[in-house]
């Protein structure tokens, strides 16, 4: 796998009358599921930007020793998504650049779809780039814009009119903090009141444990300037079609987060309920694939009346299997990760529920384990429709080749998995579970229709490719 922008990450920005480093550090811990490759914090104090960042989990990259002495009343933080082969510390964030009046620090979640074109364009004009990162384009554009505009809001707006794709950003211009969400609202970003100040963070689940109060989502296309006393909204000049990533609710976000007014746990439970209506099964027990399939399975159990039981014990200390570089390693890791609970499994007709099938590695292996443990039948229900198209907006699903559903029919996949039955939730069912107009969602990975222009791919709205930020 090549180096490149991989930005389904977590971001935070905080400002208060007292030190915010502790809050940022805790918030990063609370959104650690969004990225395990690297972590970092930038704070502005004593007229300077101070940044600590490193590869690893928050606990190591930002260990007490490493952040000793780091303090300030305004700062941002970042956790970076882990993908095979992209461990370079140069891509760790926050990204900092000097501008005519000090330092800009950026924490970015998402992925720009036109960054290669922008990079090529500006390299022609003599700009140099030090990392293969789309966030660097954001930084460079802001620096250039600040030279002529000298107003962060104007500089951000002008930058937004050039970039396309997914971005939830926390940006520091020295001691001024901005939270920015792309006009489609692909990735989440919310505002909260924490301590004696305010915070912007990827997920609401990071606010309550800090003793804070969730205020609201940052709106698609909105720029919010946050101070210790208040926040000021700069809404977009025009409304654009939204494209919230359905995968945030299906898999990526924490169940206890609320994104765009929908609690992730409730959506997952509704997906399970709708699966029970769309694809019922005559079985003895409903079993989740922990942890990602838990709420989906519970929903299935509630709607079908079939008892819910835990049938796998998960070893939390095994690395994420999804990102391992070879199929053999991924399969071995699944073995290490999940052990069946015999009393749930032996002699029973089991229905397992998982959030998604990408390559099929996990389920193929787990069904084998269940059969070896004496399961009489193994039926599979899946909380997302078949994944058939790459994500260009920050979820690490990059090539069609890796998707089992691009090569095989549902019946063929059932055979490959060695399941007694297999059903995915329908796209209509998923939209119903999300209780949102279909047009407000990005469903590109399941229907192949992309909300932004991607060369060679089908565009959702052929006529509205540009946004007006004037
Ligand atoms: P697979 O074994 O390749 O079919 O992967 C599917 C499992 O990996 C799902 O059950 C999810 O829990 C998880 N998963 C799906 N998409 C991703 C992703 N982009 N990054 C990490 N894990 C994922």
Image: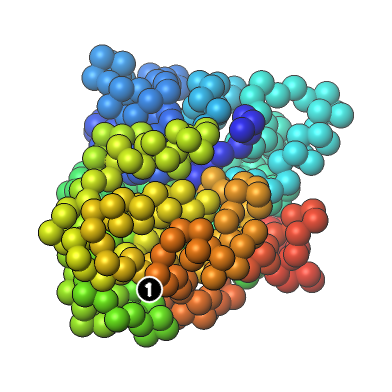
Residue 446 in view, yes or no = no
Task: Classify mark 1: helix, strand or loop.
Answer: helix
Quadrant where the C terminus is found in the figure: bottom right
* Mark 1 lies on residue: 271
Determine the residue located farthest toward the bottom in the rendered image: 277
Q: Note whether ligand 1 is within 8 Å of mark 1.
A: no
Up-down: is 115 above or below 461? above
Which of the pair 227/160 is nearer the observer?
Answer: 160
Q: How is the image coloured?
A: rainbow
**Residue at position x 52%, y 33% from top?**
325
Q: Residue furthest right?
A: 124
* Vertical arrangement, residue 401 with respect to residue 408, above or below: above
Bin the neighbour count of mark 1 within 10 Å (Cα to Cα): few under 14, some 14-19, many 20 and up. many
111, above or below 218, in the image: above
Residue 27, by quadrant, is top left
* Relative horizontal placement of residue 455, taking residue 36 as reference (left or right): right
Where residue 91 appears, x then y in whole percent?
Answer: 55, 27
Label count reads 1
Residue 308, x across and y down, in percent: 19, 69
Side of 50 relative to 95 (left or right): left
The location of residue 145, given as percent across then percent down, is 69, 37
């Amino acid at each position: 796998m090549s180096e490149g922008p991989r930005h389904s990450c977590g971001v935070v920005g905080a400002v208060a009358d007292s030190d915010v480093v502790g809050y940022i550090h805790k918030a990063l811990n609370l959104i650690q599921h969004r990225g395990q490759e690297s972590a970092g914090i930038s704070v502005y104090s004593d007229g300077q930007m101070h940044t600590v960042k490193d590869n690893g989990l928050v606990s190591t990259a930002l260990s007490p020793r490493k952040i000793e002495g780091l303090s300030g009343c305004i700062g941002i933080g970042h956790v970076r998504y882990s993908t095979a082969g992209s461990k370079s510390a140069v891509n760790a964030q926050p990204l900092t650049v000097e501008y005519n009046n000090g330092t800009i620090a950026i924490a970015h979640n998402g992925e720009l779809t036109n960054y290669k074109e922008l990079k090529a364009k500006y390299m022609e004009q003599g700009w140099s780039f030090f990392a293969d990162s789309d966030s660097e384009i954001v930084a460079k554009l802001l620096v250039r814009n600040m030279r002529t505009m000298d107003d962060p809001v104007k500089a951000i707006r002008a930058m937004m009119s050039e970039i396309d794709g997914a971005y939830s950003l926390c940006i520091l211009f020295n001691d001024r903090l901005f939270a920015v969400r792309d006009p489609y609202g692909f990735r989440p970003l919310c505002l909260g009141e924490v301590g004696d100040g305010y915070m912007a963070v990827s997920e609401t689940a990071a606010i309550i444990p800090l003793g804070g109060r969730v205020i609201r989502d940052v709106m698609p296309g909105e720029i919010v300037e946050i101070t210790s006393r208040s926040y000021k909204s700069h809404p977009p000049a025009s409304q654009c079609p939204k494209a919230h990533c359905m995968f945030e609710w299906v898999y990526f976000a924490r169940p206890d987060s609320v994104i765009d007014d929908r609690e992730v746990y409730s959506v997952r439970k509704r997906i399970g309920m709708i699966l029970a209506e769309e694809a019922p099964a005559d079985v003895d027990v409903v079993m989740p694939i922990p942890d990602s399939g838990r709420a989906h399975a519970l929903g299935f159990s509630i709607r079908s009346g079939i008892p819910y039981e835990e049938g796998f014990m998960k070893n939390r200390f095994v690395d994420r299997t999804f990102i391992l570089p070879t199929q053999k390693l991924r399969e071995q890791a699944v073995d290490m990760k999940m052990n069946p609970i015999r009393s749930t499994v032996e002699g029973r007709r089991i229905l397992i529920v998982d959030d998604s099938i990408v390559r099929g590695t996990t389920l193929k292996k787990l069904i084998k384990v269940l059969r070896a443990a004496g399961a009489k039948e193994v039926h599979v229900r899946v909380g997302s429709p078949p994944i058939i198209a790459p994500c260009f907006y920050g979820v690490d699903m990059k090539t069609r080749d890796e998707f089992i559903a691009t090569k095989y029919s549902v019946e063929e996949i059932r055979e490959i998995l060695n399941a007694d039955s297999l059903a995915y939730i329908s796209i209509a069912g998923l939209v119903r579970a999300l209780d949102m107009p279909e047009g407000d969602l990005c469903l590109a990975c399941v229907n192949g229709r992309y909300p932004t222009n991607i060369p060679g791919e089908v565009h959702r709205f052929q006529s509205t490719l540009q946004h007006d930020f004037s």
